[in-house]
């Protein structure tokens, strides 16, 4: 199922790119977190720096309104650090899953001087987990240790209401949510800021996403786009 959906997404993006008015490669930094409260709040010290990279297309519907989509390899997750004994001892953990994300954004353009433009965007996204690692390191006096493990995803069918292959040691394979962003189109380069609001609880054993907003992805990103000709 994962391979099928990924293949469908790739085919759709390349088909759209063939008719797009703008195609650009994108790369940047993600500041990822996971909500820890029922109302969707996060802990600032849990923010994890990771990355986003991929290709995006705009259809060129009009000078004011446009539609944008693409495929991004994007990092999510969070970290935790606890210190003891005046900071000499600690336990540090980092949780960094990787996803292929398909965003679909509605773009509103505001022309500016010198052919530059301001834009705002909003729209849904879907993402499929493909890998990532979890790392833990600790130090207590003269003793220290490090461990690393691959992140496991459940093999769930997203078209059913059940969570197939669920386990407490596995994430849901599929994530979805909303993107909100803004940026500047300077013609030779596109500067973007985006906030990804995850709507799915990430643990595979949780099947009621609407109970509260705890345990969902929250990802702020900044990126640079380089047009492939205009």
Image: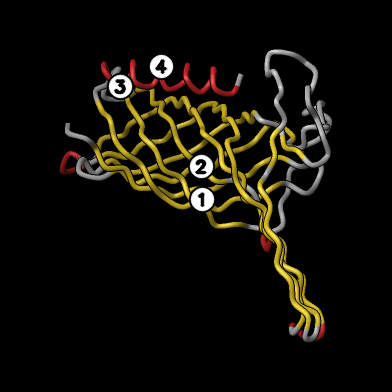
Q: Position of residue 45 (x, y in %)?
A: 68, 63
Category of crowding for the residue at label 3, using alpha-carbon neighbours closer than 10 angstroms: few (below 14), some (14–19), many (at least 20): many
Secondary structure under tag 1 reads: strand
The CA span between labels 4 and 3 is: 9 Å
Quadrant of res 121: top left
Which residue in the protein does label 4 denote? Answer: 12
Which disc is residue 98 wearing? none
Which residue in the protein does label 1 denote? Answer: 30
Which residue in the protein does label 2 denote? Answer: 74
**136 and 149: which is toward the camera:** 149
Category of crowding for the residue at label 1, using alpha-carbon neighbours closer than 10 angstroms: few (below 14), some (14–19), many (at least 20): many
The CA span between labels 2 and 1 is: 8 Å
- Location of the N terminus (image quadrant): top right
**Residue at (80%, 47%) from the top-left corner?**
37
The CA span between labels 2 and 4 is: 19 Å
Tags 2 and 1 touching, CB below 8 Å:
yes
Category of crowding for the residue at label 4, using alpha-carbon neighbours closer than 10 angstroms: few (below 14), some (14–19), many (at least 20): some
Tags 2 and 3 touching, CB below 8 Å:
no
- Location of the C terminus (image quadrant): top left
Q: Position of residue 99 (x, y in %)?
A: 55, 37
Residue 4 located left or right of residue 217: left
Which residue in the protein does label 3 denote? Answer: 17
Secondary structure under tag 3 reads: helix
Category of crowding for the residue at label 2, using alpha-carbon neighbours closer than 10 angstroms: few (below 14), some (14–19), many (at least 20): many
């Amino acid at each position: 199922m994962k391979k099928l959906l990924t293949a469908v997404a790739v085919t759709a993006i390349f088909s759209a790119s063939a008719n797009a008015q703008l195609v650009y490669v994108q790369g940047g930094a993600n500041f990822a977190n996971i909500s820890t409260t029922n109302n969707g709040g996060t802990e600032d010290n849990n923010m994890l720096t990771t990355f986003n990279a991929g290709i995006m297309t705009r259809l060129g519907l009009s000078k004011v309104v446009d539609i944008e989509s693409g495929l991004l390899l994007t990092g999510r997750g969070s970290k935790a650090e606890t210190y003891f004994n005046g900071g000499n001892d600690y336990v540090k953990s980092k949780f960094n899953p990787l996803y292929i994300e398909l965003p679909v954004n509605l773009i509103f353009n505001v022309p500016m001087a010198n052919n530059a433009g301001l834009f705002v965007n909003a729209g849904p996204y879907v993402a499929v987990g493909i890998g990532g690692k979890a790392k833990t390191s600790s130090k207590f006096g003269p003793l220290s240790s490090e461990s690393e493990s691959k992140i496991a995803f459940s093999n769930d069918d997203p078209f059913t209401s059940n969570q197939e292959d669920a386990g407490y040691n596995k994430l849901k394979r599929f994530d979805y949510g909303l993107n909100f962003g803004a940026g500047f189109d300077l013609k030779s380069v596109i500067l973007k800021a985006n906030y990804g609001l995850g709507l799915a609880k990430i643990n595979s054993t949780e099947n009621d996403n609407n109970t509260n907003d705890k345990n969902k992805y929250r990802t702020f990103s900044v990126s640079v786009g380089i047009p492939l000709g205009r």
